[in-house]
Amino acid sequence: MPEQSVIYSQRSNHQPNYSELVRFLLQPFLDAPNSLSLDCEMLNGQSKVWIRLAFEEADKGRAFGRGGRNIQAVRTVIEAAGKAVGQSVHLDIYGSNAGAAERDSSETDSDSKPAPRISPPRPSSAPKPAIKSRPQFP
């Protein structure tokens, strides 16, 4: 029986369709999957990829997941797809408030004031009650 040799290339010349990949991963979490909008931009001769997405505010909790697990999993998958073809992939998430794209991070607009910091309660300076000792037996 003749031997068949199969050659696998380490890197593929095909570029992943990041928009469809992100759509495939995120749409199951969204109540309004048609509200998902994506923008994919290639920079530096296609070595860097920026993916920007926005969805309805009501879907934010489900899309991010507990502690951001869902969105972190999406980031991990697209970063792995990018590494396979030698690209650096970044994901930015924007909120949608009345049709305006607003960056969903700790950055604030120059017109708006940052949210006030809430510090933890300070311990009171009142004296602590005396601890009653147990009677000791000889």
Image: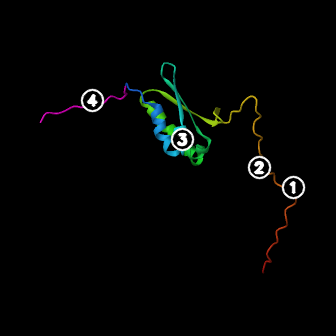
Q: Residues within 10 Å of mark 3 (few under 14, many from 20)?
A: few
- Secondary structure beneath label 4: loop
Identify which residue is drawn at 82% across, 68% down.
131
Judge whether 135 appears above or below 85 on screen. Answer: below
Q: In the rendered structure, which amino acid carries the disc numbered 4?
A: Ile
Q: Which mark is residue 72?
A: 3
Q: Position of residue 112 (x, y in %)?
A: 76, 33
Furthest-right residue in this view: 126
Q: Which range is magenta?
A: 1-12
Q: In the rendered structure, which amino acid carries the disc numbered 3?
A: Gln
- Residue that numbered label 2 is attached to: 120
Q: Position of residue 61 (x, y in %)?
A: 60, 46
Among the two numbered marks 2 and 3 on one chain, the one whose residue lies closer to the N terminus: 3
Judge whether 62 appears above or below 134 on screen. Answer: above
Identify which residue is drawn at 12% across, 36% down.
1
Q: In the rendered structure, which amino acid carries the disc numbered 1?
A: Ser
Q: Position of residue 97 (x, y in %)?
A: 65, 37
- Residue that numbered label 1 is attached to: 125
Judged by its main secondary structure, the magenta piece is: loop
Among the two numbered marks 1 and 4 on one chain, the one whose residue lies closer to the N terminus: 4
- Residue 119 vs residue 15, the one in the foreground: 15
Label 4, label 2: how many angstroms apart (C-alpha)? 61 Å
